């Protein structure tokens, strides 16, 4: 099962360090799970082609400190996969730490022609999922962008989906932008190897995925050189600067002038970003004090309810979430919760460094993340091409699939707004 016994999850790292136990499945049961039936909308569509792929990062044991490991983007190996059980054994042999992602494209022009004039052709759209989810949770919406010509990239962030790590345990949010960087670097490398040019890249994300998009853009400096991206992806010198173990979130990462380069981002469409927690979902002060006291020896312990029950006013949303075995169904883990709080504070502190074309959208009825925090962040963004809109009455899940055409109108409004904004910048 993807969700292990909490006591075992706490003890396992200590047993591994003592040489008493070896992890044989670093995805903790998620790799071999069959595709979720609702994703057949993509998987069984003969007009759509896809590739499953994973990129390997150096194992945690190869670093002197945890901070070095969390901030690492060095790609040691990459391969296409078919999700077979034997790939687990070969993955462990290669170090046991990888990021899984998938790419999706239409094989040819749709029968009724490209939508939006096909201006998305030759462009990439990378979608970053939120807390407790994984990449293919975007499946109901992907074809909307494929029909405009985009190639869609869906990564599973560390500890989610078919990427490695205890399900939804994030001891440092630096893991998240590092994973996005590794995926985009591998995409560029793969395209060059096939004789393709580097594509224009758009980023989108919701909730924690929105935080990841924003922090990725401020952390990694852009370049227009595909060769430079490939060269730095193969650079295994991931050591932080002297003094990098100082107190504070930022001090655990490399300074931007020593950072690896990323593709130039043509724009970011960010939904309900995790900039500030809504009062309904932030754990009490007592829970936070307990978390800070036990994080050093029980970081993976599930402790807080957090956003559970606060993402939508439609009970079908959580019912469908719990039906999907690849999602994380437990309470918010101690280390993950504290990392989220640190990450929000650091993003607020460095908002002026997010210099990209951007549109932020949020629901006025969001009970998980605060639309007020998003508005405050927007005011500090430096790029002239920036927009923000609060959708009246929308909850945290802004892309809820409706039970019928009328019920689906709210989702269609967001999708149309999203795609139109992207196409104008193609």
Image (cartoon, rainbow, N blue to C red):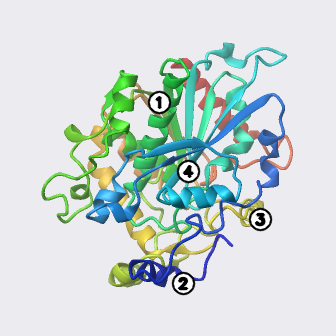
Q: Which one is nearer the viewer's eye here, 25 or 122?
A: 25
Element type at mark 1: helix
Q: Earlier in the sequence, mark 4 or mark 1?
A: 1
Q: Find the distance from the CA under tag 1 to the CA under tag 2.
A: 39 Å
| Residue at mark 1 | 189
Of mark 2 and mark 4, the one earlier in the sequence is 2
What distance separates the C-alpha of mark 3 from that of mark 1?
36 Å
Q: Residues within 10 Å of mark 1 (few under 14, many from 20)?
A: many
For residue 405, side relative to residue 392 (left or right): right
Is 293 drawn above or below residue 163 in the view shown?
Answer: below
Residue under the point 51% across and 53% down: 98
Question: Residue, x 44% and y 32% (percent of image)?
Answer: 358
Residue 384 in view: no
Q: Residue at x 77, y 65 (%)?
A: 323
Query: For the residue carrying disc 4, how many other residues have a C-alpha within 10 Å: few (<14), some (14-19), or many (20+)?
Result: some
| Among numbered discs 1 and 2, the one appearing first in the sequence | 2
- The residue mark sitting in front, 4 or 1, is 1
Q: Which residue is mark 3?
A: 323
Q: Earlier in the sequence, mark 3 or mark 2?
A: 2
User: Which callout, 3 or 4, points to the residue nearer the camera?
Assistant: 3
Quadrant in which residue 181 is drawn: top left
Q: Which residue is mark 2?
A: 8
Where's the N terminus, which quadrant? bottom right
As helix, strand or loop, the secondary structure at mark 3 comes to: helix
């Amino acid at each position: 099962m993807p969700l292990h016994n909490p006591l075992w999850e706490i003890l396992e790292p200590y047993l591994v360090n003592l040489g008493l136990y070896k992890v044989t499945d670093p995805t903790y049961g998620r790799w071999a799970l069959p595709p979720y039936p609702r994703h057949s909308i993509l998987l069984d569509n003969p007009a759509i082609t896809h590739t499953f792929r994973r990129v390997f990062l150096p194992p945690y044991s190869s670093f002197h400190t945890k901070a070095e490991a969390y901030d690492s983007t060095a790609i040691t190996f990459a391969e296409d996969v078919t999700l077979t059980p034997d790939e687990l054994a070969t993955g462990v042999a290669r170090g046991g730490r990888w990021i899984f992602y998938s790419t999706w494209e239409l094989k040819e022009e749709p029968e009724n022609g490209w939508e939006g004039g096909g201006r998305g052709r030759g462009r990439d759209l990378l979608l970053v999922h939120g807390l407790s989810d994984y990449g293919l949770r975007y499946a109901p919406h992907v074809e909307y962008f494929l029909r405009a010509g985009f190639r869609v990239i869906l990564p599973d962030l560390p500890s989610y989906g078919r990427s490695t790590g205890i399900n939804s345990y994030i001891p440092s949010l630096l893991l998240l932008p590092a994973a996005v960087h590794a995926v985009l670097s591998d995409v560029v490398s793969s395209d060059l190897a096939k004789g393709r040019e580097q594509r224009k890249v758009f980023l989108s994300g919701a909730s924690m995925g929105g935080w990841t998009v924003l922090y990725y853009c401020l952390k990694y400096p852009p370049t227009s050189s595909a060769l430079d991206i490939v060269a730095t992806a193969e650079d295994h010198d991931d050591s932080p600067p002297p003094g990098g173990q100082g107190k504070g979130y930022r001090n655990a990462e490399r300074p931007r002038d020593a950072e690896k380069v990323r593709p130039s981002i043509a724009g970011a469409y960010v939904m309900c970003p995790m900039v500030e927690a809504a009062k309904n979902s932030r754990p009490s002060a007592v829970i936070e004090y307990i978390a800070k006291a036990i994080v050093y020896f029980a970081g993976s312990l599930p402790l807080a309810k957090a956003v559970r029950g606060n993402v939508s006013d439609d009970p079908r949303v959580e019912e469908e979430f719990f039906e999907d075995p690849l999602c994380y169904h437990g309470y918010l883990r101690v280390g993950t919760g504290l990392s989220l709080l640190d990450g929000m504070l650091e993003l607020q502190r460095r908002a002026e460094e997010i210099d990209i074309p951007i549109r932020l959208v949020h629901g006025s009825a969001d009970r998980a993340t605060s639309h007020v925090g998003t508005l405050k962040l927007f005011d500090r963004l430096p790029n002239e091409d920036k927009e923000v809109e609060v959708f009246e009455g929308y909850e945290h899940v802004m892309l809820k699939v409706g039970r019928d055409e009328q019920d689906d109108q709210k989702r269609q409004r967001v999708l149309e707004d999203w795609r139109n904004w992207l196409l104008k910048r193609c």
